[in-house]
Image (spheres, rainbow, N blue to C red):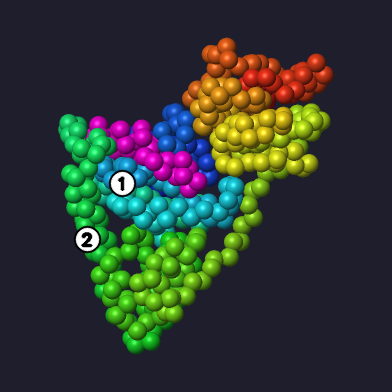
Amino acid sequence: MDEVSGIQAVAWGLLDGGIEIITAYPGFHAHELASLLGIQVFSVNEKNSLALAWGASLAGVRSVSIFKNLGLNDAADPFINICTLGVHAGMVLVVLDDIDVQQSQILQDSRPYADFPCSLWLEPCSLQDAYDLARQAPQLSEQLKTLVVLRLTNLLTMESSQLIRQKPEKARLNWCRKPEHWVVHPVNGKLQRRNLEERQGKVYDWIEELYSQPNFSPGAVVNIIVGMVDRDVDLDHEIVLKAYPLPRRWLASLAASSANFVVKEHGLPYLADKLAAGIGAQRVQTVPLKNNHEGSYRITDKYEALYAILRSVQNRFIVGDLGGHTLDPLRTIDSCLCYGCSVGVATGIAIAEPTLNVICVTGDAAFLHTGKTAFAETIDRQVPVSVIVLMNGGSVSTGGQILPGECQYDSTRLEQYEMDFPLFCNDNNMRFLLNRPIRPRLIRLKTKF
């Protein structure tokens, strides 16, 4: 039997678990997993990806939404409400936590989102476990009527192993009209809170059954392992956790023992802090994991022809977006907040300091993700900002996935131009476009990078 990657193991598990609808946004192995699942169209952003998957669940079809951990920030609104309302057919959210910051801008552990009731989080401890949990997740979601989150980290994405694949299953539910269950409105709040409490109880019951009640010798030192972390040889003093929230009765048994605990987890001390709160901080030790993998940080000079022009602009403020163009060797960009936010940041700067010539540089994927919506407000406020969209046909940083939408506006309330990247950069007559505009300006540059 050939070895398979961790991402392939998860893909097989989801397919064998009856997943039919796949939604995703490109980023840290998310597009790789989605492609292995056969995705045809990527979502315009993570928020819509999650909303579409929930809609499929309501219609009775098992679904999965896939994106990296920072994408969960964008999808927080539907995520929290889905946790509150629950699901109909099985629904899985795969979150890829780039803990080693190999392809991300900051280190973020997604697990604090697990504190919102009522979601069930699973984290595999091996590639076989990754397949088994991914296959079980849709059915488990359907059984508990709650969203199941599958958290994967860099440790899984770098592993390969053999695994045993089981027979695929298919299951569909009939759609049932229940507005009181699925309509977010205060009039339905009482029923929805009662349903939430019932589902939360079932989630805790399921988690309690995962773990046997501990029986340690007095003064034992116990390793608590979370996810795919290197294990010690002495299995008699090791507990493997792979589901959140923590089981309450099990946690009480730990507190009643006299054991001390060493927690190893890939990410922030999320579970270690929770154990410390329930057991006592003096009995819990956190072992930070060493990052043995260099991040693939991208610094490029291929846009130097454009950036040289930008640096020649007097009284400039250059706002960038995340992408292959974010950081050039001469550090032309003055600020960059998060993916898709460059237009909003640039608009705020221009409003606060009207004397500045504010120029925004973004990619077509980031512009379609959030920037285009933000630019609608720029136009409505008539803020004099120049927005340059590097149109290279898709999400180049993740392999060129095509995203839905057009990077243009049908509006007479802004200046709008489209030209080839070399023409703009090499024709001195085009430099006038970077003079401070009197109204919003959109410049679409076609590139081949």
Q: Which residue is mark 1?
A: 83
Q: How many marks?
A: 2
Q: Residue at x 22, y 42 (%)?
A: 189
Q: Amino acid at mark 2?
A: Asp
Identify the image quadrant of residue 294. Answer: bottom right
**Magenta run includes residue 69:** yes
Of all residues shown, which one is farthest toward the bottom? 218
Residue 310 place in picture, x, y as percent? 76, 30
Q: Residue at x 78, y 41 (%)?
A: 330
Span highlighted in magenta in the image? 49-78
Residue 346 place in picture, x, y as percent? 63, 33
Residue nearer the viewer, 53 or 13: 53
Residue 403 place in picture, x, y as percent? 51, 28
Q: CA distance from mark 1 to mark 2?
A: 17 Å
Q: Is 180 displayed left or right of 254 in the figure?
A: left
Find numbered disc 2 in the image and state the secondary structure of the residue it sits on: helix
Q: Which residue is mark 2?
A: 205
Q: Amino acid at mark 1?
A: Cys
Q: Is 330 displayed left or right of 59 in the figure?
A: right
Q: Name the mark on residue 119.
A: none
